[in-house]
Amino acid sequence: MAAPDAAPRAPAALQEQMGVRFANPALLRQALVHRSLINEADLAPTDSNERLEFLGDAVLGLVTTELLYERHPDYDEGQLTRARASLVNLNAAARFAQALGLGAHLMLGRGAEMTGARKRASVLGRAFEALVGAIYLDAGLEAARDFITPFVSEALGARGPAGPQKDYKTQLQERLHVERTATPVYVLVDASGPDHDRRFRMAVTVDDEHLAQGEGSSKQRAEQDAARAALRLLNGSG
């Protein structure tokens, strides 16, 4: 793939956020290339993330189906099908991408950038699926399963057949927007441990007020843990 004029913002930081280290970084790079960049950067049509998206959609569907089958032995086929449909779609994938902060790392053409494609659910969802496809090609199904499982587990929420519950970060953001007209900010407090077993501590603040901290094997998981702790505090149970 020819080198595009634009580059993703800190791909090494994205790998750290994901808790994944690519043996072939070119796969990660391709997962970030939106088709709008093809003409501007003199790339081949197959250099965008669309082929990886095609693969990642299938992997995401398989892993989600496995999780539902294992965790809900009481579900019949119809319930399993409805639950899977609520989790394997572009809107759900976009929420996973937003939790990961994936939009900031995408490589877009100038026109797409100007029209706000970086925040568009369809673009984010397809990029997340492409990322899953890249992980699958780079490290296999187990690595893809390890990456996908926390997102799906959080989305399952109460594990009801009606569909996923909003993740903790989304719940906290929506609540603070209503109650304080403010947006939570997540700050890295500490990172420790070897590369294969990193632990992150993130703090969540609002209007410079410290709310809570959380820990996890990636920044995204630590942020979710911090948001969960903040919600418990706001509910008077933390």
Image (cartoon, grey):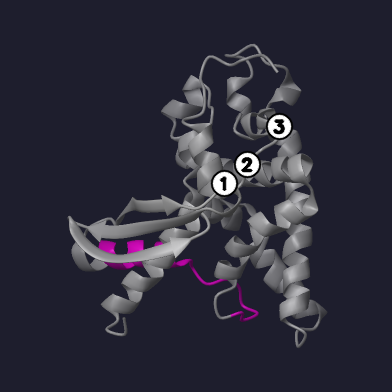
Residue at 73% across / 43% down in the picture?
Answer: 133
Mark toward the viewer: 2 or 1: 1
For label 1, the residue is 195
Circles 2 and 1: CB atoms closer than 8 Å: yes
- The answer for how far apart the CA atoms under marks 2 and 1 are is 9 Å
Depth check: 60 or 194 in front? Answer: 194
Is residue 121 something one can see in this rendering? Answer: no
Q: Secondary structure at mark 3?
A: loop
Please say if 235 is above or below 124. Answer: below
* Image quadrant containing the N terminus: top right
> Which quadrant of the figure has residue 40?
top right
* Image quadrant containing the C terminus: bottom left
Circles 3 and 1: CB atoms closer than 8 Å: no
- The answer for how far apart the CA atoms under marks 3 and 2 are is 9 Å
Mark 3 or mark 1: whose residue is earlier in sequence: 3
Depth check: 217 or 150 in front? Answer: 217
Q: Which mark is residue 24?
A: 3
Residue 46 position in % (x across, y down): 75, 25
Depth check: 28 or 65 in front? Answer: 28
For the residue marked with disc 2, what is the amino acid?
Answer: Arg
Q: Residue furthest right?
A: 77
The part of the chain drawn in magenta is 159-177
For label 2, the residue is 21
Please say if 190 is above or below 103. Answer: below
